[in-house]
């Protein structure tokens, strides 16, 4: 339980630091999100060609690529979590806005801020514990169970990275909802979240 208390304190300190340096954090976050999105696209294309090559090798030459299934599975978290914060910044996640759309604009704004704050808490907890898991996999030098024995920690490390960045992005969105003049969105789609428009 003390881990969660320490985590809560760290999250509050990070929120304060992000608030104090919001302009710089927002610009840097946008660049990091775009770079990670490009990385996610590159990994996606690699998986596409890797699977095509495996199918070709298996059926045309009767020589399947060893570890193709494990390799593709290990790249999936990297594809998803590297692009997670960018997707939040562009409001690309699927949302259920039915209840929010029925609210007046001021109530909608506060409901959105409450949802974002709760999401920050949940994503911070997930980032912390998945980070512990990734560190443990790295410390044990964990590998897949079949040859060619791919290391598992890079896939695990993408998870806390994605959850950590989306937590920062959601805090920037909360600040933008509080005071759009002082705290610009710093998002590719520039503007407030869809539910508030």
Image: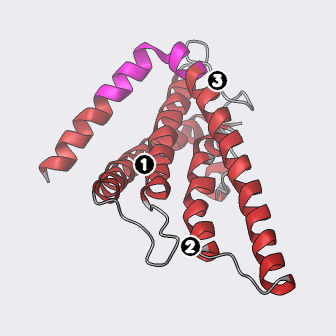
Nearer the N terminus, badge 1 or badge 3? 1
The residue identified by callout 2 is 70
Residue that sits furthest to the right in the current view: 60
Cα distance between the residues tagged 1 and 3: 22 Å
Q: Is residue 158 above or below residue 33?
A: below
Kindly identify the residue that appears in the image at 44 percent across and 57 percent down.
156
The percent position of residue 119, horizontal first and vertical second, equals 45, 48
Nearer the N terminus, badge 1 or badge 2? 2
Kindly identify the residue that appears in the image at 47 percent across and 69 percent down.
149
Point out which mark residue 186 bears.
Answer: 3
Quarter of the picture containing the N terminus is bottom left
Segment colored magenta: 13-27
Residue in front for this viewpoint, 115 or 66:
66
For label 3, the crowd category at 10 Å Cα-Cα, with few meaning under 14, some 14 to 19 and many 20 or more, is many
Mark 2 secondary-structure assignment: helix
Task: Judge left or right: residue 175 versus residue 61.
Answer: left
Occupied quadrant, residue 130? bottom left
Of badges 2 and 3, nearer the viewer stands: 2
Occupied quadrant, residue 193? top right
The percent position of residue 26, horizontal first and vertical second, equals 56, 22
Residue in front for this viewpoint, 121 or 194:
121
Point out which mark residue 160 bears.
Answer: 1
The percent position of residue 34, horizontal first and vertical second, equals 67, 34
Cα distance between the residues tagged 1 and 2: 21 Å
Q: Is residue 22 magenta?
A: yes
In the rendered image, is residue 68 in sight? Answer: yes
Principal secondary structure, stretch drawn in magenta: helix
């Amino acid at each position: 339980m003390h881990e969660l208390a320490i985590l809560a304190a760290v999250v509050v300190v990070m929120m304060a630091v992000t608030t104090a340096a919001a302009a710089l954090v927002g610009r840097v976050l946008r660049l990091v999100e775009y770079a990670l999105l490009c990385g996610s696209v590159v990994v996606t294309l690699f998986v596409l060609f890797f699977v095509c090559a495996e199918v070709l090798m298996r059926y045309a030459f009767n020589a399947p690529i060893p570890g193709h299934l494990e390799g593709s599975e290990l790249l999936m978290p990297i594809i998803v979590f590297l692009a997670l914060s960018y997707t939040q910044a562009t409001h690309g996640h699927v949302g259920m806005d039915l209840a929010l759309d029925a609210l007046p604009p001021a109530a909608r704004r506060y409901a959105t801020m409450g949802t974002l704050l709760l999401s920050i808490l949940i994503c911070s907890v997930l980032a912390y514990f998945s980070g512990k898991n990734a560190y443990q996999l790295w410390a044990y030098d964990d590998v897949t169970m079949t040859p060619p024995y791919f290391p598992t920690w890079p896939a695990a490390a993408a998870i806390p990275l994605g959850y950590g960045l989306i937590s920062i992005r959601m805090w920037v969105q909360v600040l933008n909802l509080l005071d759009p003049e002082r705290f610009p969105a710093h998002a590719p789609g520039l503007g407030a979240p869809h539910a508030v428009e």
